[in-house]
Amino acid sequence: DLGQSLGNMFGLDTATGLAYENGGLSSDAGLAFVQSHDDGPPTANNLAYAYLLTRQGRPKVYYDGNNIAPTNWSNFPRPGRGDALQSGGILDSLLDVHHRFARGTMYFRVSQPDLLVFERQVSGQSTLLVALNDRGDISTTPVSVTTAFPAGTVLHDYSNQRPDVTVQAGGLV
């Protein structure tokens, strides 16, 4: 039974067939989303999608397909992400990052009230460094983190808000 398996690190529950890891359901066992046909988007919609599309687990970008009145929240189903099928916007960039880099284990580097920094790695090799600031502006929050990226690696900001950063000795960014 799943209750007995929750104390184990990783595995498959024989009774339910559900995967578990680190005392809970596997990150692949569910589907995460920012908005649905029942609810409109959060205030920080782009920030929510940035987290959703770079974290572990399966993401869902909701698009209702109708968009009869995309800003009328009294309609049902609720309007979905209007740019879900467009090229060149922030969502398109986030989907590109998701497909190219967001894989492997997630390691939290900084967790503060308005700042979250995490790294994704596969077999100890970094694939992605994500920094999310929910202060509501694009000002810089000075913070240094140690990563598994080799020194000299150039990290690109796919949100196009900051210049590229070069990883220093010891993986320092």
Image (cartoon, rainbow, N blue to C red):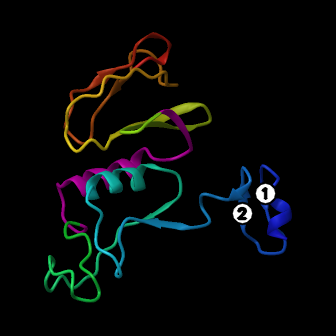
- Residue numbers of the magenta segment: 84-110
User: What residue sits 60% from the left and 57% below the top?
Assistant: 27
Q: Is residue 28 above or below residue 35?
A: above
Q: Is residue 40 above or below residue 136?
A: below
Q: Is residue 113 left or right of residue 11?
A: left
Q: Residue furthest front?
A: 113
Q: Which three-letter amino acid code belongs to the residue tagged 1? A: Gly
Of the two numbered discs 1 and 2 on the same chain, state the one appearing first in sequence.
1
Say which quarter of the image contains residue 115.
top left
Which residue position holds label 1? 11
SS category of the residue bearing label 1 = strand
Say which quarter of the image contains residue 117.
top left
Q: Which three-letter amino acid code belongs to the residue tagged 2? A: Ala
- The front one of 143 and 162 is 143
User: What residue sits 72% from the left and 69% below the top?
Assistant: 18
Task: Give how far across and how far down residue 43 sits, in percent.
Answer: 25, 59
**Image quarter hosting the C terminus:** top left
**Image quarter hosting the N terminus:** bottom right
Kindly identify which numbered label has been placed on residue 19: 2
